[in-house]
Image: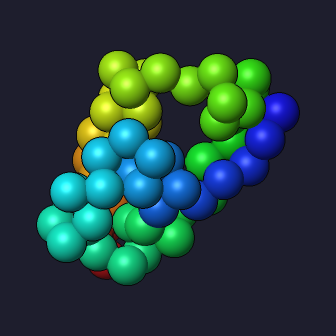
């Protein structure tokens, strides 16, 4: 298992998305069962989308 920031995932696969993500989203900690080395682009996009949704859900709760 490996813990990385969402920004690490974004930088590796989709650096063009950086300007569109908020700092709190980029600083999110993501636990990867098999580590970042084995992560594929499709999986990375799914993680990014899920993280964005989670942050949107939390903003509505406050």
Task: Say which quarter of the image contains residue 59.
Answer: bottom left
Residue at 30%, 46% in the rendered image? 14
Colouring mode (rainbow / by chain / secondary structure / one colour): rainbow
Q: Determine whether, in the image, residue 34 is placed left or right of residue 26.
A: right
Does residue 31 lie above or below 46 as drawn?
below
Does residue 36 lie above or below 8 as drawn?
above
Residue placed furthest toward the left:
20
Front one among 8 and 22: 8
Q: Residue 28, image x and y in percent?
A: 53, 62
Task: Say which quarter of the image contains residue 26.
Answer: bottom left
Q: Residue 43, image x and y in percent?
A: 43, 23
Instruction: Judge whether residue 31 can be spotted in this image.
Output: yes
Residue at 39%, 52% in the rendered image? 10
Q: Count the numbered circles shown.
A: 0
Q: Residue 23, image x and y in percent?
A: 37, 79
Q: Determine whether, in the image, residue 19 is placed left or right of residue 58.
A: left
């Amino acid at each position: 298992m490996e813990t990385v920031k969402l920004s690490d995932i974004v930088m590796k696969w989709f650096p063009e998305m950086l300007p569109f993500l908020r700092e709190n989203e980029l600083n999110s900690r993501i636990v990867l069962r098999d580590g970042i080395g084995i992560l594929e682009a499709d999986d990375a996009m799914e993680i990014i989308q899920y993280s964005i949704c989670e942050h949107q859900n939390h903003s509505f709760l406050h």
